[in-house]
Each structure stands twice: as C-alpha cells, then as structure tokens.
C-alpha cells in the first residue's frame, strides 16, 4: 500500500505524460464570405520621393482671420518621372486623409513664419486637398530647426527641377528665346530703302502724250462728221 505522497507523485507523472502525448488542437474554420485583395492606387505610382519629413500643417482662414490646424503627418515632395513636375503631398496620421496637394512652381516664395526657425509659410494658387481647386495660404511647423532647414533646401531643389526640366516651363523659355532671337535678327538686318519713282516726265514723253491726245481728238471728230453725213442722207 502506497503512501499519500507517493500517490500524488504518481498522479502528477501520469498527467504530465498524458499532456505530452496529446497533440495540440488547432481548429481552422473557412470564412463564410471571402474578401478578395484589392490594390489601392494612391496616384503616387509614377512619382519618386524627394523628401519626407514629419510636420504639422496650418492654413489661414480668411473668414475668421486666424490660422487653423490642417493636420499632422509626413509631408512629401514627389517628382513625376515622366514630365518632371513636383508636388507637395501631405496626409494626416491614421486616417491618411489628404491635407495638402499642390504643384510646385518656380515663383513660390518660402517665408519664415513669425520669426521662428522651425516654421515657414507660403502662398499657393491652386491646392487640391479638398478635391477642389482653392487658393490657400499655408504654414508648416517642424519638430526641430534641422528638419526645417532640410525642407527649405529640398523645396528649392524641387523648384530648380521644375524650372529647368519640366516641359511646361522649358517650352515657355524656348519660345521666349525664339522671340528674342527673331527680334534681334530683324534689328540687325538692313532693310533696303524703297526706290523712289521719278514721276517727272521728260519732254519726249510729254510730247507723245499730247500727240496721242491729239490723234484721239481727230478720230472723234471724224466719227462725228460721218454720223452727221449719214443723217443728212
């Protein structure tokens, strides 16, 4: 007859052996509704990223005359690989809603905002963040001055790319240069002076004209005589 202690040890060993022999149960249930994978297009597939910096964006509300927060997230400079246009795109955290979406033009000025070394503001003629074209005055604030300086440098590089490589602006520059060259050529080319026609007639030509007039007068008189003779007959 075994003691209670030995009996408990024996039961524990049996339970351990039983658990070791029992395979793990991994139930698998097929879903009732199968959802196919969908490719989401962000319209950034043909663009390369020039910069990506975390910041907070503001817009100036002309109705209330105050700055209002637009969102916090990563602001990006995206260069199109085909036509070399560059645009500013920013999406809010978590929701990924667009809060800035506009093209960069060479005439945009990046100004220091309120004397801060971490914030800038600039004016945009056409921003499409709300899916409609709107003129906006935007301001952005970065976490440190280094990110702010990096943003300013990358923005200036993007403007140079647009000015020198974008087909829209290179065509305008070439057309302006063609017009200037044509104006220069017209100024350099000596235009011949029109020859003055001497309208004064010499004596021989005057005589010929008077002779022609006299002969015409004789013919007319002869015709009148012939008409009168025919009437008299």
Image (cartoon, rainbow, N blue to C red):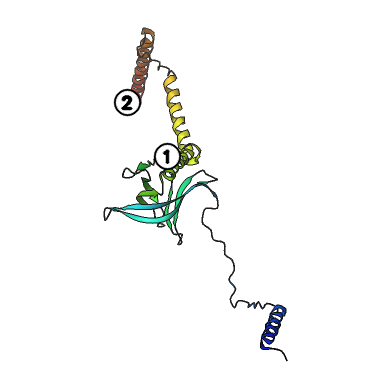
Residue nearer the viewer, 166 or 58: 58
Look at the image and tell me in which quarter the N terminus lies: bottom right
Asked which quadrant contains residue 36, the reply is bottom right
Q: If the image is split into quadrants, where does the C terminus sit?
A: top left
* Classed neighbour count for the residue bearing mark 2: other residues with Cα under 10 Å, few (<14), some (14–19), many (≥20): few
Position above or below: 221 against 139? above
Residue drawn at point x = 35 percent, y = 55 percent: 69
Q: Is residue 1 left or right of residue 143?
A: right
Q: Nearer the viewer, residue 183 or 171?
A: 171
Query: Percent position (x, y) of residue 20?
Result: 71, 78
Residue 50: give x, y in percent of width and height. 51, 45
The location of residue 9, given as percent across then percent down, is 68, 83
What distance separates the C-alpha of mark 1 from that of mark 2?
A: 99 Å
Q: For the view shown, which residue lies furthest in the top direction?
A: 203
Label disc, if present, on residue 106 of the rendered structure: 1
Disc 2 designates what residue?
Answer: 232
Q: Is residue 190 above or below residue 118?
A: above
Whether residues under marks 1 and 2 lie with C-beta atoms below 8 angstroms apart, the answer is no
Q: Nearer the viewer, residue 95 or 46?
A: 95
Does dot 2 land on a helix, a strand or a loop? helix
User: First in sequence: mark 1 or mark 2?
Assistant: 1
């Amino acid at each position: 007859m075994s003691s209670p202690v030995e009996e408990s040890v024996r039961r524990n060993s049996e339970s351990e052996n039983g658990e070791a022999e029992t395979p793990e149960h991994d139930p698998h249930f097929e879903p009732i509704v199968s959802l196919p994978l969908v490719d989401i297009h962000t319209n950034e597939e043909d663009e390369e990223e020039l910069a990506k910096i975390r910041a907070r964006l503001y817009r100036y509300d002309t109705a209330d005359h105050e700055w209002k927060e637009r969102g916090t997230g990563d602001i990006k400079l995206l260069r199109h690989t085909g036509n070399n246009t560059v645009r500013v795109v920013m999406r809010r955290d978590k929701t990924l809603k667009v809060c800035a979406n506009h093209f960069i033009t060479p005439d945009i000025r990046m100004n220091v905002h309120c004397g801060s070394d971490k914030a800038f503001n600039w004016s945009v003629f056409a921003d499409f963040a709300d899916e409609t074209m709107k003129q906006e005055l935007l301001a952005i604030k970065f976490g440190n001055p280094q990110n702010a300086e990096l943003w300013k440098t990358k923005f200036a590089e993007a403007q140079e790319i647009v000015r020198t490589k974008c087909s829209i602006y290179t065509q305008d520059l070439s057309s302006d240069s063609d017009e200037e060259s044509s104006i220069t050529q017209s100024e350099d080319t000596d235009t011949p002076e029109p020859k003055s026609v001497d309208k004064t007639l010499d004596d021989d030509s005057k005589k010929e004209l008077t002779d022609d007039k006299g002969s015409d007068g004789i013919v007319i008189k002869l015709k009148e005589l012939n008409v009168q003779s025919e009437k008299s007959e």
